[in-house]
Image (spheres, rainbow, N blue to C red):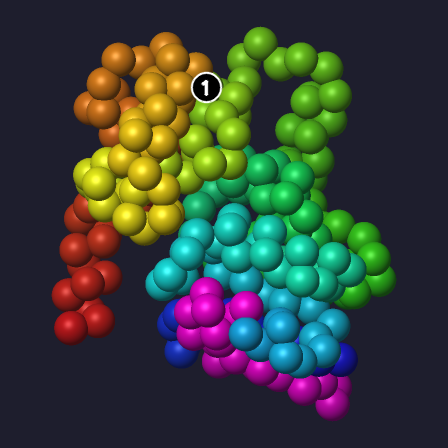
Amino acid sequence: MRILIADDHAVVRRGLKQILAEAFKRSVFGEATNSQEALDSVSKEPWDVVILDLTMPGRSGLDILKEIKRERPKLPVIILSMHPEDQFAIRLLKAGASGYMTKESAPEELVGAVKKAVAGGRYVSLALAEKLASLIVHDPHAAPHESLSDREFHILRMIASGKAVGVIARDLSLSVKTVSTYRARLLEKMSMSNNSELVHYAFQNQLVESRSREMGTATRKE
């Protein structure tokens, strides 16, 4: 089996490789440290499965997933993230992911997810399966952000991370006017009136990392 591990932390890549090497003997592993390396590797080499970190340097994990699926529609991609599955999993599964796992998951869960994905199935936890079942009928208690499009959701997270409209426009190769339109649309959908409310909501629902954690990570990297 050929397994591509895409994560910007060397320790995480090594740990994932050790777990999977024990379960899948004679497997071949590849590594990517950012989103562009992941895309380049998928484009150039034949992988059986990709383990993709949701938040690597560069483009968003959702955008990378969509591009991978356009390039290789049948290639299984398992998303690995520090964010709770109830905040991101459904959106990513709809985009084509073969599974969504948090980094707190047990090693045997990862092995099981890879086996299921390679066999053509999708891995979901019991809790997520129940949530998916509830979506078969309209859920009046669904979180406000679940009504957002993928682009609106991405911009919500960027605003909550402290990025100005001009910076978001540059990062996404959009005009400032277009970003402002998306912002107005998501405010309306979520029944909010300003960025402060969006930021509070995003942190309360764990859609972005806390600023204290981000600062700690930056300090460690320095």
Element type where label 1 sits in the image: helix
Dividing the image into 4 quarters, which one contains the N terminus? bottom right
Identify which residue is drawn at 18% across, 48% down.
Answer: 212
Q: Which residue is mark 1?
A: 144
Q: Is residue 121 left or right of residue 43?
A: right
In magenta stretch: residue 144: no
**Secondary structure character of the magenta stretch overall:** helix
Q: Is residue 150 left or right of residue 128?
A: left
- Residue placed farthest to the bottom in the image? 26
The part of the image, by quadrant, that contains residue 40 is bottom right
Residue 107 at x, y percent in the picture: 60, 66
Dividing the image into 4 quarters, which one contains the C terminus? bottom left
Pick the residue in front: 220 or 45.
45
Pick the residue in front: 133 or 31.
31
The correct choice, above or below, for 145 with respect to 137 in the image is below
The part of the image, by quadrant, that contains residue 45 is bottom right
Q: Is residue 11 left or right of residue 130?
A: left
Identify which residue is drawn at 33% across, 19% down.
Answer: 184
Span highlighted in magenta in the image: 12-39
Residue 208 at x, y percent in the picture: 33, 42
Residue 157 at x, y percent in the picture: 35, 38
Residue 213 at x, y percent in the picture: 23, 52
Q: Is residue 126 left or right of residue 166?
A: right
Identify which residue is drawn at 74% across, 21% down.
Answer: 136
The correct choice, above or below, for 136 with respect to 115 in the image is above
Amino acid type at circle 1 is Pro
